[in-house]
Amino acid sequence: MTTSTRASGDRRRATIEDVATAAGVSVATVSRALRGLPNVAFSTRELVRTVADSLDYHADPAAARLATGRSRAIGIAVPLLNGWYFSQVVAGAEAVCTEAGYDLIVMGVTGDEARGNFLHGRSAVHRRVDALVMVDIPLTPEETEQLAGRGLPVVTVGGITDRFPSVGIDDVEVGRLATAHLIGLGHRRIALLGGQPEDPLGFDVPDLRRHGYERAHAEAGLPVDPRLLVGGNFSVTGGYEAMSALLGLGAPPTAVFAMSDEMAFGALWALRVLGLRAPEDLSVIGVDDHDVSAAVDLTTVRQRVADHGARAARLLIDGLTGATVTAMRHQNPVELVQRGTTGPPTQHDPETPRKP
Amino acid sequence: MTTSTRASGDRRRATIEDVATAAGVSVATVSRALRGLPNVAFSTRELVRTVADSLDYHADPAAARLATGRSRAIGIAVPLLNGWYFSQVVAGAEAVCTEAGYDLIVMGVTGDEARGNFLHGRSAVHRRVDALVMVDIPLTPEETEQLAGRGLPVVTVGGITDRFPSVGIDDVEVGRLATAHLIGLGHRRIALLGGQPEDPLGFDVPDLRRHGYERAHAEAGLPVDPRLLVGGNFSVTGGYEAMSALLGLGAPPTAVFAMSDEMAFGALWALRVLGLRAPEDLSVIGVDDHDVSAAVDLTTVRQRVADHGARAARLLIDGLTGATVTAMRHQNPVELVQRGTTGPPTQHDPETPRKP
DNA sequence: CTGAAAGCGCTAACAT
DNA sequence: ATGTTAGCGCTTTCAG
């Protein structure tokens, strides 16, 4: 075969000089004309455009970057690119960037080591991007400072720092809303599927949602049973395992609030395996309104995830183009979407429906 | 508030000159030392490294790109970044790129207009990336030529061209495998949930899988009922709608082969809404082995999606670093994962289980 | 083994 | 309105 590395039509790309020569003007004029700068005669501009087109000329971004200091690229750092939530955020950001003529550079930042590299130097952050969106990357105060010290505009999605604007939702409210829904239905033993118990640093979304869960209990004058708080790793299998464990408890819950729909899917899976059903045997509520949530009739707290990414990108691009960012926190609304996996608790003895 | 656009510690970044001066050597030596080039005294190299570190120096990628012509970035073009399949591919590519020290620039290319812009010029393809992976972007022969003419290494994922290496699966086999499974179970009226009937250009995965579906029928001596071939748009809701329509047919199918798990989820959804169940009332099989497929017990044809992206990136990076790409098509294996949504057809009158 | 210097392609003063 | 020119920060001959 032929290696695609050596393609055929490898004719040298046109440079600004080629255009200038062909159009009979100077390179400066070409630059001005093509970028829509003032002080170019209409006819000249037209001419230059035509010539440039015919030569399929486009300014080399690296050269432009070197000369201007701006790269027209924004970076987006996400832990684990797979996972519905993150891909939605990236999709939202991508749409805005593309439409604004910015490139989007995605960087997976998973684990402490990657975060170190990332924050340190070698990574793409360096001078490749004009701005950065950090999606739920936990940052220590020192790291925050360090990043801020880079002089790079940053917007976070999800987490909140005291240095950068952020976009996200009221996570406490999410937890409260979901839990109150369950309590309102009559549930008293409500399990919580959250992040890892040993979550290293302050990725605080799980904590906030748990606060909401606790608050709802407090508002209803209900106690929280700590044995009902388990980690589900925000994944389908994590939810499955956590739910399986919960169902093995002496006094299992009658409902579960999963902090993400993917964990809720895992919970439903665990129920099915044991021959149990939602909401008859146990109610399940998630968070996100994942694409397949409607398909499995999952009650959930919807958030407009793609919009988080879009707003973050918009904020950054607007800031880059001179606008002043006006608020620190950009809160998106959440909404309870009541579907079929939640209902009143059944009155049968909770001990009965163990593994058939 | 303070706009993050004007950050504080905006001290000028160290340049190679700064390092050279501080180390008392020339910039050329710094360049050589830092990039591990030969002909640098061990002690000099150590010195330069230390100084560079202490100055937090990192070569400006744009300047390096300008001088070398290489950007250490690869682009990945995907139609719609959301969607499980694409985000998996991107995740796979991202992992390889990060580990190889390449940036990954994602570009959403949806619709003809975007494809035009993309292939033409303005987009990031231009000189920003050293190589490009095109994920299921339909290309006319002319577009293929045009792209090849750019002299940019390209690898496609999914689709096959006669110009670029590609990675993917045997889509005909996927269709055959899924359909044969159903036929083996005793099904005779098997519906097909595929792409859009009016699919503009040759995004040919749906066609190939349909061929497999037809082949399985042929091998079993079974006829294909064209009324059972419907488009599901590769989305959950598309699958839902298509399945709903199928169930309204005078003689509904007893099984359905959905070309993606997401459509299969939609099909299951439609069944549930009508009070039907899989596999009792109708068997459902998908393709992908989506994260939630196990959770809903969906039988499917598994493909290692993230690996597609990883291999594509690997191929490109290896090619960039001098290796010769050895094959045109890199086929990943597929595998039937038998779960609970497929079973023998029920013998009751197919007319009976209409909407209760 | 190391240094000097010529670019890479573009932008941004500064002329004119 | 347009042209000249000095960089931007790095790599890479070519000398030594």
Image (spheres, coloured by chain):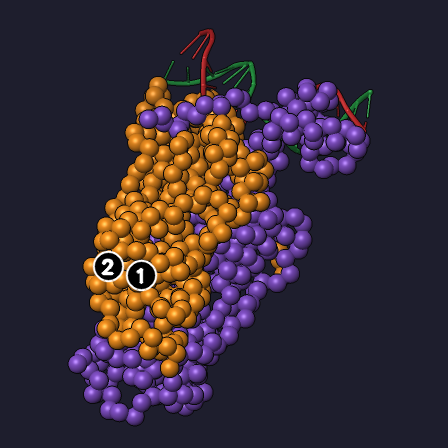
Chain colours: A purple, B orange, C green, D red
Name the side, left or right, on which B81 lies relative to B175. right
Quarter of the image for residue B346 reads bottom left
> In the rendered view, would you say C5 is above or below B345?
above
Q: Amino acid at mark 1?
A: Ile
- Residue B332 drawn at (x, y percent): 28, 44
Residue B214 visible in the picture: yes
- Residue B225 drawn at (x, y percent): 35, 58
Q: Amino acid at mark 2?
A: Ile
- Residue A78 drawn at (x, y percent): 43, 54
Q: Are marks 1 and 2 in contact (CB under 8 Å)?
A: yes
Q: Chain of mark 1?
A: B
Quadrant of image for the N terminus of chain B:
bottom right
Q: Which residue is mark 1?
A: B190
Residue B287 visible in the picture: no
Out of A337 and C1, give the one closest to the viewer.
Answer: A337
Q: Which residue is mark 2?
A: B183
Residue at 29 percent across and 84 percent down: it is A281
